[in-house]
Image (cartoon, grey):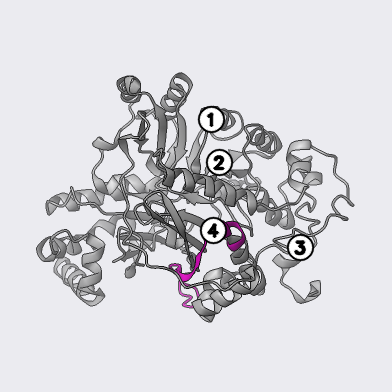
Amino acid sequence: MVQIDTISKPEAIKQQSRQLRGHIARDLADTATPFDKEGYALLKFHGVYQGYDRDSATERKQRGDDKIWQFMVRARIPGGRLTADQYLALDAIAERYANGSLRITTREGIQFHGVVKAGLKSAIAEVNGAMLTTLAACGDVVRNVTTVPTPIRDAVHRRLEADARALSTHLLPQTRAYHEIWVEGAPWREDEGAAEAPDPLYGERYLPRKFKMGLAIPEDNTIDVLTNDLAIVALFEGDCLLGYNFLLGGGHGMTHNNPKTYPRLATAVAFIEPDDLLAAAAAVVRLHRDHGDRGNRRHARLKYVIAENGEDWARERLSQYLGKTLEPCRGIPAFAVPDHLGWHEQGDGRLYLGVPVSSGRIADTPQSRIRTALREIVERFGCDPILMPSQDIILSQIDPEDRDAIEHLLREHGVRLADDLLPAERWALACPALPTCGLALTEAERVRDHIVAAIEARLRRYGLEGERLSIRIAGCPNGCSRPYTGDIGIVGRMPGYYSVFVGGDFAGTRLNTLLADRVALREIADVLDPLFALYVSGRSEGEGFGDFCHRAGLATLQQALGETRKGAA
C-alpha cells in the first residue's frame, strides 16, 4: 500500500476520510461557520459544493464582514428521467431551501443554488425522500450517467433508459456514510466507519479525478457523447442490440496558457457484447483508478491516460480486467443531433413537448413565470419531466387532447416556445459562472442572452438567422457547457473578456480551434462578423458554420478578422 506521506494532499484527505465521512456530521451542527478544506473536498462526493456569493464578497470584505457562505446541491438523475411527483418534490425543495430556482445541468441533473448551511441536511434528506440521491453527483467518482432524452416508446429507447439506470446503480459508491449523515442523521462519532471495508470498486482513495459517462446512439448525439471519459455508443440492427462501442478519454477541462492541459474527444477502444456492459464499464473505471495521475490533479483525467498510452494499450488492459479478449470498435454511422424541442409523438399514442429553458434556469421572472407554469402543468396533467443535456426540459406522457391546454398555460405565463426562437438561441448553452461558481473567471449565464442577441443581429445582416449553429458559453476553461465542441465556443478568460473558438461541428465529433483571445464581451459579435461574411459567400450547399470554418482554415479566418479590424481602425 502507498504510504500517506507519499501522496498528494487531496489523495490523503480521501484515504483518511473513513469512507467519505470526515468530520461532515460533526461540522454540520455549527451553522455559522463554513466547512474547512477537508470538509469542502469531501462534500463533493455527497453532491455538494461549498461557495459564497461572489457579487457581495468585495463589498463585505471592505466592511469587515464575512462572506455570505452558501451551497450548491446537485441531484443525481440518470438519463434526466423524473416522475411527476419527483419533479414536484424538487420544486418544493427549491422554494424551501434554495434561491427559488431549479437549474438543469448539461448532464441531465438538477442543481439547487443558494442553500444555506442550516438547511443543507434537510434539503438533501428531502431529495432522498423523493427516491433520488445527491451521492456521487460530484467528486472523484462516476457522476450522473447521461443518455438520449427523447421518450420514444420503442425497444431502442427503452433499452437506453434501462442501461443508464443500471450503469448508475452499478457504479455508485458503496459507503454507508451518505445515509448515516444525510438520511438517518446518526450522531457523529470519531470511530464511525473505521471498520468499514474500502469500496469494492473505488478503493480507499476513489478515483484520481471525476469520471463522466454517457450512452448514445448514432442517430441521437444530443449528449455530446464523445466529451465523456467513457463514451458508450449502442449499436442496433432494427430493435436488436448488437453491442456497444466503448470510446475512452473524452473531457473538456483545460487551463489557459498550459499546453499540457487540453480538451479531447473520446477515441475508439473496444466493442462490448450486450451482456458485458456493466462489467466492462466497471473495468474502465478500474483503468482510471489504477493508472490515473494521483500526483497532479490537472493531469489526472482519463483522457491523459489514453492520449499517452494509446487505444491498443487500453483495450489490452480492459481485456485483462474482464478476463476475455476484446475486439476493436465496430464501424459507427455518422452522428446526428435531432431537435427535441416542440411537439413530438412518443409512438404510443401520446405526445411529448420539449420546452426551451434559457441556461437551464427554471425560475419565475417578470418576463416569464416558467417555474410556475411547469409546476402547474405537472400537477394538473401528470407529465413526467425529462431533463435535457441542452439545458431544456421535456414534458412527456401527454394525452393529445391536453395539447392545447398545456400550450395555452405556457403562453399565459409568458413562456417562449421552440417556434419563438431563432436557431442561435435554440441551441445555445451557458454554465452558471458568477456569482455562484468559485471557478468562474467571468460571466456566462447572466450574459448569455446578450451574447446570443448580438450574434443573431450579425446573422440577420447576412440573411443567416435561420441557419442552425451551436453557441456554448463558459465562464472559465473547465468547459461545463461543452464549449470546445460545436460551432462557436466562448470561454471566460478574465473579468469581461473571453477566448473565442470556432470550427467544431454541430454533431459533436470535432473540436474547435482558438480564433481570438482576450475578446471583450461587447466585441464578441464583431469578431464573428467577418466570418459570417465569408460563410455566406463561400459555403457549400448544406455546409454548417463550424464545418465551413474548419474547411476554410484558421489562417483564412484570422486574415479576414485582421482585415476587418484594420479597416475599423
Q: Nearer the viewer, mark 1 or mark 3?
A: 3
Q: Nearer the viewer, mark 1 or mark 4?
A: 4
Q: Secondary structure at mark 2?
A: strand
Task: Give the number of the disc on residue 113.
Answer: 2
Residue sitting at 64 percent across and 71 percent down? 323
Q: Is residue 338 left or right of residue 95?
A: left
Seen in the picture, residue 409 relative to 146 is either above or below; the reply is above
Query: In 3D space, how far apart are the residues under numbered discs 1 and 4 (Cα atoms)?
Result: 26 Å
Q: Amino acid at mark 1?
A: Asp
Q: Amino acid at mark 4?
A: Lys
Question: Which segment is the magenta one?
Answer: 256-280
Task: Give the number of the disc on residue 91.
Answer: 1
Q: Is residue 175 magenta?
A: no
- Residue at image mark 3: 204
Determine if residue 236 is in view.
yes
Q: Amino acid at mark 3?
A: Glu
- Residue at image mark 4: 212
- Crowd around label 4: few <14 · some 14–19 · many ≥20 (10 Å): many
Front one among 373 and 383: 383
Q: Nearer the viewer, mark 2 or mark 1?
A: 1
